[in-house]
Amino acid sequence: MTRYALRSMASHKLRTALTAIAIVLGTAMIAGTFVITDQIRNAFSDIFGTSFAGTDVYLSRRPAFGNGNGQAQVGPLPASLIQQVRQIQGVAKAEGQIQGIGSLVVNGKFVASQGGAPNLVVSTLPKPFNQNTLVEGHYPEASGQVALIQQLADDHHLHVGQHVGLTTLQGVQPVTIVGVFRFGNVSSIGGATVVATTFADAQRWYDRVGKTSTISVDGESGVSPKQLKQRIAAQLPHWVKVQTGAEAAKEQTDEISGAINSFFTPALLAFAGAAVLVGAFVIFNTFSITVAQRMREFAMLRTIGAMRRQVLTTVLGEALMVGVMASVLGILGGVGFAKLLGALFKAVGFGLPLAGISVHLWPGVIVPLAVGVGVTLAASFAPARRATRVPPIAALREGAVLPRTWLSRFTPYIAGLALVAGILLVFAGVTGSGPTTQRLLTIAGGAILSFLGLAMVSRYLIRPLARAIGWPLSLGRGASGRLARENTTRNTGRTAVTAAALMIGIGLVVFFSVLINGFKESFLGSIDKSITSNLIIQSHSQGNPVPLDAVKAAQHVPGVDTAVGIAFTQVKIGNGGTDEANGIDPATLPRLYSIQWQKGGSDALLGRLGAGDALIEEQFAKSHHLSPGSSFEVTSIDGRHVDLQVIGQYKDPVLFSGFMVSQGTYSELTTDRNPQVLLVRYADGANEDATTRAVRDALKPFPDVNVQTNAEFKASFSKQINQLLYLLYILLAMSVVISLFGIVNTLALSVFERTREIGMLRAIGTTRFQLRQTILYESVITAIIGGILGIVIGIVLAWVVALGFRSSGIVFAIPYGQVILSLIVAAIAGAVAAAFPARRAARLNVLDALQYE
Amino acid sequence: MGVISATDVTRRYGEGDAAVDALKGVSLDVPAGQFAAVMGPSGSGKSTLMHILAGLDRPTSGTVSIDGTDISELNDKKLTLLRRHNIGFIFQFFNLLPTLTAEENILLPLQIAGTKPEAEWVESVIERVGLGDRRRHRPAELSGGQQQRVAIARALVSRPTVIFADEPTGNLDSTTGTEILAVLREAVDTYQQTTVMVTHDAGAAAIADRALFLADGLIVRDSPCRDAGDIMAIMADLSAR
């Protein structure tokens, strides 16, 4: 029987290939996810391994809470600690290092990193801590000297001796390039720019006078890093974190791994999962059709003594081989997919360092293989079961039909139930209170269930939908339109599953479009509603603050009424959870931002916002059970505790989540006085354009500062959101492509099935062109049905999710343009899918087709 | 009692007013080694009778036994095993697997049963049906007559108690049909193979040992075969009544 299954596959190479592609692409996405996450992890492991290779013990400030999202920057250590450490027995060398963010300024323009990687500034460490390799010149020795990582020098044609600028918190500093180095022995760390300065310069420029970010310690020979660590830790206060170099490298690598494992991998796997689900539909449909076409074969096998189980094994054996073959190809294709992903992320500004490609048995090979084979077998099980129900007598009779099972009577009810249950599950997942992973899995499960439910229900919708969509086509001359319409309703189950495969891809596209559009609209809406200033100023480099000097410069521009920075950082609330602390100037805030007060508050509360007072956001109040009059404790990342008294409540979950405190209170929470955002309001009657120009001129000395009017800020925000959407579209495109192969397969099999009928049509005068047209229309009708179903389920699911997130300010807003575009894409996809089967049908020889048995 | 034995077999399709009695009480006995032809016009019930004798359909009443086993009460699994070991089939439309070669098609019943083919026996069957030089060909590369030879060999290969042939010449031209009947006759004689053939072709029935005539669900005549003319006379007689 195995041989029979093998032969059957080999003699239907095209069918097998088209079926296999459905699984190849999905497994390639799974395998590619593992390849690229492995590459990122290895790259960071290499980077940190190199960084700490010459360090025995590493000192830094101990963060007061797990800083998973990296929003709060841990503060510096006092520089006096360096001397203190040097006195400790067994210490051969101890040096401080400053790490900051800054870019080079060449000919008045600042030099950005590639693909969103950071722009790093580090002070130069001596040997053995410095693991870099000098390529040219020397490391900075005197003030104003810098050395560059090789890639940066190469990309921008910078050479030793050149005079350039460096953005710092003290404005742009003139510097001279004195050296070019490689990091370890690589020329670049994932596109990041790295500028090395002297320790003293870095202290002055990055607000670290009398301080150091970290301390690297080298032990005397005979003292193990572990012993040295214990000795140092015993003599220093508890807020100094003491690690061996190896521990520090491992911790920083683990932090990256954690981020990859908790977000990156699951997100990519979710898209791979969607592709696999679509593949499952294609496989189910292909096997259903071929089982129906091979009924006579199965009946004959049963007649000559094959057991039901043997028939089942034949079909499943074929599925197994398709699954194995496709998964193996998918795993190989995963390498290509990983490369594609790497290029994609770089293109949208998520540039990440990538190590060489390596594929591991676990999970890189085993998971995609298991999923690919498992899904193929699962999807072909129902058709295989149906093959076993073929009565032997069908071998002797024409036109035998399969008996209906008792279950089939309940199918519509089960399908409807699954659809509703799926949607409810999604809602439960969104609003539930369990751990995030569990909630996300609930949402995913609900979405899958609703897709399956709609796919099963859709067979009852095919007739009316096909009639409506085919109506304009049937008006044309000739019978093509009418025939196509009839063909789609001939086997509604088949059309439904074919359309359903496309429905998933389009459904997810619409789901994300609607959801993200809602997020965008709520953000833009909040800006329009609340921001009353004229300019929104931030750093070009993500996570970098706006220098206080820039704030001062803006304040002195004529025509500017108010220019005030807003600072924010993550803090720990009480003893559970972190949230955002916003440092504001109560006196000027109403000029820049209109607060939506709750619980009877008014702007008068701002006047009373003194030391230790806080205004809390509605969601924050809810999650920590606070209200005006109550108090709470917050802990900064550096371990400073502050008790806060709630004096008022407002609502703005989008721009000012968490709570607000005065700048004075805020400064107790962080050493960093530079604000993240600078809002500028013009004086009444000032010429807007002229003032904007004047502010830009005044901020020229701060080239990494991005001066945007509200309209520009909104436009660049929309652009970023759109880039995210494009990334999602590309990831979802795989699902759509797979469903296209499904349409090709269904049509090709239908053409094969109707060979005699096509011969008849040709014999009575149908032209090749008309025949092609019929199949083209049939395909387009099916695709549009899939598109419509996808749009409906996508909008419903997005609505459910938006409903669940309503309290976080997410609105439900349908982007009509994008929705209509997705329908057009579906129609075009249908037309593309028809090309091959239509050509095949048109090429059939009339006589052969008529005689075909 | 013969190898095949049916007693008072009736078969009713549908219910109530729409009920059709395809068989109204048929009893017959086929002894071992006999080549019996079941004849009758369309709708006489001859196909139904064969389906029931072969265990593909169940009688409404009456019993059928093959080699002493009452098959009317067997479940699907036992019936499958019975077909596997005791029954061979030859179909009007050949029903070969297009992806397998002639020889592989012939060996298929043995493979399904998981029995190792005896090379000598298989050789003898292939030679007997005259396929010695065509064994590596696929069905699409064979003529209709050759395809039916493959089907005959496939029916013979498992040495069944009885072979059922359903209009074996129905899809062949008359010359080829005659050849196929000769092959069948020879096989029956050589291997003492009990065979039941359903046909409406008098020429085909003439090569059998015995002809059973069915009309309106009843056996109306059961006579030894002499020649085609004789049989046609009986047919004419039956349709005149």
Image (tube, rainbow, N blue to C red):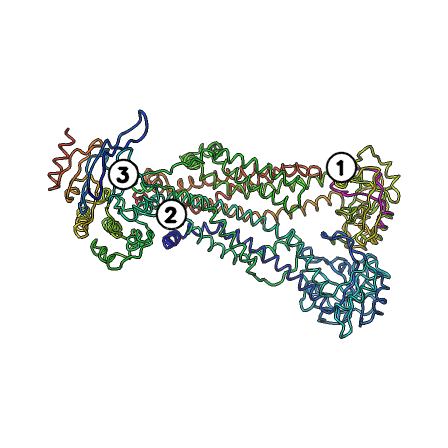
The residue pinned by badge 1 equals A529
Q: Please name whichever residue, B81 or A396, is drawn nearer the observer in this view of the structure.
A: B81
Measured Cα–Cα span from mark 1 to mark 3: 83 Å
- Figure disc tally: 3
Answer left or right for A372 relative to A44.
left
Magenta stretch: give its range. A643-668
Q: Secondary structure at mark 1?
A: helix
The residue pinned by badge 2 equals A311
Mark 2 residue type: Val
Neighbor class of circle 3 (other Cα within 10 Å; few <14, some 14-19, many 20+) is: many
Mark 1 residue type: Lys
Residue drawn 48% across the image and 47% down it: A378
Looking at the rendered image, the disc whose residue lies closer to the viewer, 2 or 3, is: 3
Mark 1 touching mark 2, by CB under 8 A?
no
Mark 3 residue type: Ile
Locate residue A300, reporting x and y percent. 32, 45
Q: Is residue B121 visible?
A: yes
The image quarter in which residue B237 lies: top left
Examine the structure image and report whether residue A646 is included in the region drawn in magenta: yes
Neighbor class of circle 2 (other Cα within 10 Å; few <14, some 14-19, many 20+) is: many
Q: Are marks 2 and 3 on the same chain?
A: no
Looking at the rendered image, the disc whose residue lies closer to the viewer, 1 or 2, is: 2
The residue pinned by badge 3 equals B52
